[in-house]
Amino acid sequence: MKHLLLGIARRDVRIAFQQKAELVQPIMFLLMVVTLFPLGVSPAPETLQRIGPGVIWIAAILSSLLSMDRLFREDFNDGSLEQYMLSGMPLSGVAAVKVLVHWLISFLPLLVLSPLLAMFLNLTLDMYVALIATLILGTPLLSFVGAIAVGLTVGLQRGGLLLALLLIPVFIPLLIFATSAVDSAALHLPYYSQLAIIGAMLLLAAASAPFAIAYSLKVSQN
Amino acid sequence: MWKWLHPYAKTENAYQLCLTLQPWLWGCALVCLIVGTVWGLAFAPQDYQQGDSFRIIYIHVPSAILSMSTYIAMAVAALVGMVWQWRTAYMAMIAMAPVGAVMTFIALFTGAAWGKPMWGAWWVWDARLTSELILLFLYIGVIALYGAFEDKQQGGKAAGIMALVGVVNIPIIHYSVEWWNTLHQGATISKFDSPSIAPEMLWPLLINLAGFAFFIAAVTTVRLRSEIVLREMHRPWVKRLADESGVA
Amino acid sequence: MSGLRISGLTCVKRDRVLFEALNFQLMPGELLYLRGPNGAGKTSLLRIITGLSEPESGEVCYDDMPIASSHSFLSALIYLGHKAGLNGALSAMDNLQFWLAQHGTEVSPSGIYAVLETLGLVGLEDIPVRLLSAGQQRRVALSRLWLKPAKIWVLDEPFTALDIAGIAWLERQFKQHVDNGGMIITTSHQPLSENAGKHSTLDLEYRF
Amino acid sequence: MQFDSFSSFLHMGGYAFYVWLSFAVSFGVMAVLVFASYRQHRSHLKSVVLEQERLQRIKRAKKNAAVSVSHDR
């Protein structure tokens, strides 16, 4: 286990902070997409409040697709992935650690930014609390499931767009439950059932995704 | 034309120029800012409508004006760099970008803080605040583009073109957002017309404006010097400078 | 008996049979030079031997144990492929330290500096690897051979981008490793000189 | 002086929170910018010094290598 943490986790954090500029880009993309909606739809506070949760979640999914590709592509292209496979560390462990580090680096800033997004879209406090809960439970799910598709497309040259085609259908249940949770929070209705479902999906992904990712990496490595 | 400026194209002279200008700029900036702020906060009369909350104007208006003018200055530096092939101009542009972004952020924050007592919400999609936010995105675009390049020379040129594209778009964005705002006039409650400026209110504003301008110039000279040191790393005068500075 | 045994190995890539029913052994203290034209499947064979790729049929055993289930195989193996396995944003030192952490080998930083010095990389240890030349990056990748105590060296074109002095030096190191009871399988686009000592060869021909 | 006492000055006609918050944040961000700019300047100077030391190390290593080669012959 120590090898995993020292060898993979610290390395990914070090690499991420070497390229600070790339850390900021998905977050700025998210901010800009959210800014488009008041300009495109209407700045009226009531409209924004109604479409708010959906806008934030759709923007989060799109921005995650952008930064997801970076998960294995660099290691695949420079040969580090081969060295991981021959290092004796379980590949599923490597995959799990890489996904968690990727979640920390690209989704934590999203959680930090969410109050600003909630302010832009005029969400009430209860809606914001529900939004944060769904984001905390939902974004790791995005990372885990996304990493499987990234593992499969890492060998292809232009995997970016194909990744979106693969993942968007898979993210739809998460989008539905997350936005319905925030909407019922707006109406002061309990939303624990939606959170429970998202939590269940997360646990399922956390348990099975690393093995699927390891397998997909072996397939694209072969 | 402009021959007397040409020697400053050589980066060492530009470095020395920054060094000599810097203390004066810091001096003027501090004096103007202190006088302007104190005068605005304590001695300027209240606004008959908004009471004392209007005093935020003494930061919001100067930073809003200067955020726009810094971007224009950036574009001018880019144009000069492009037309006369001055590397120093590109470096000045890159030095200015973060300062302009900070000014835009200040304008946004103070605008939101000023709007809260009036409209009850921290953020309203008001025409001026929205175009200010888009200006912040333009700044971030230029800074991110420059950061993405490994070869700083190339990065400077690319960011320069982006700055020029941005400056052409600023009026377009401004008027389209104004039009968008009138289109949805009913929707938002933003009567954000600045209060009628009585002369004794105006003076501290102008002083603060000068103070902010000197501040921007001073920080830009500091950042320009650091950019020059980075870009001319292998020049003997930079090596001598680094040894003298004793930053071992 | 210890050593690598390959039996009945067949590999098919994009439904073209690269090689069929390949049998050979590699005993400690032996250097095997894999020869063959481009596209003959040299790299694929090496990847199958290390376990990175699955063969169509056949088996690779180490100490009479299939490599998939053998614990000691991976810790006794170093594989250097075409790609150097170094991340451009990190420095050579960082790359090697993380690689050692992944393989669970403890080497002090001064030890790493010493190995890099023998490879003529003084002063280049702390700058991002992308700023190094291809030959220097190849040397950083090669330094792994002396950082991790491994018996089996599986090397794919180790001499690429190395200068003449580098090649001669590396061949001498091969001879030394083989004399100490190590095993090496390597491919090379130019024949091995006598510096590398006695070596057996295996030829793969191009099959349509 | 617009305000009769210092406490009413602080009170700022009921808008104390907004006025002082915006002034504090603005001058705070400006101070951070100044500090970051000077720190960046120092770090660039330091990287020049480090670069020079690195080049010396490389020269010295080459010189030693040249010396040791001459011994072998």
Image: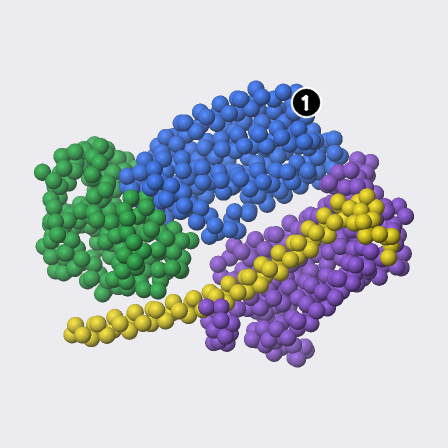
Chain colours: A blue, B purple, C green, D yellow
Considering the image in quadrants, where does the C terminus of chain C appear?
top left
Circle 1 SS class? loop
Q: Residue at x 90, y 56 (%)?
A: B198
Q: Position of residue C46 (x, y in %)?
A: 23, 44
| Left or right, residue A22 beside residue B67 | left
Confirm whether residue B94 shows in the render: no
| Left or right, residue B157 beside residue A126 | left
Using the rendered view, name the quadrant where residue A191 is placed: top right
Q: Amino acid at mark 1?
A: His
In this rendered view, identify the residue nearer to me: A175 or A133: A133
Q: Position of residue A11 (x, y in %)?
A: 40, 47
> Mark 1 — residue?
A188
Q: Residue at x 64, y 52 (%)?
A: B138
In this rendered view, identify the residue nearer to me: B59 or B51: B51
Q: Residue at x 53, y 39 (%)?
A: A108
Q: Position of residue C109 (x, y in %)?
A: 32, 56
In this rendered view, identify the residue nearer to me: B52 or A173: B52
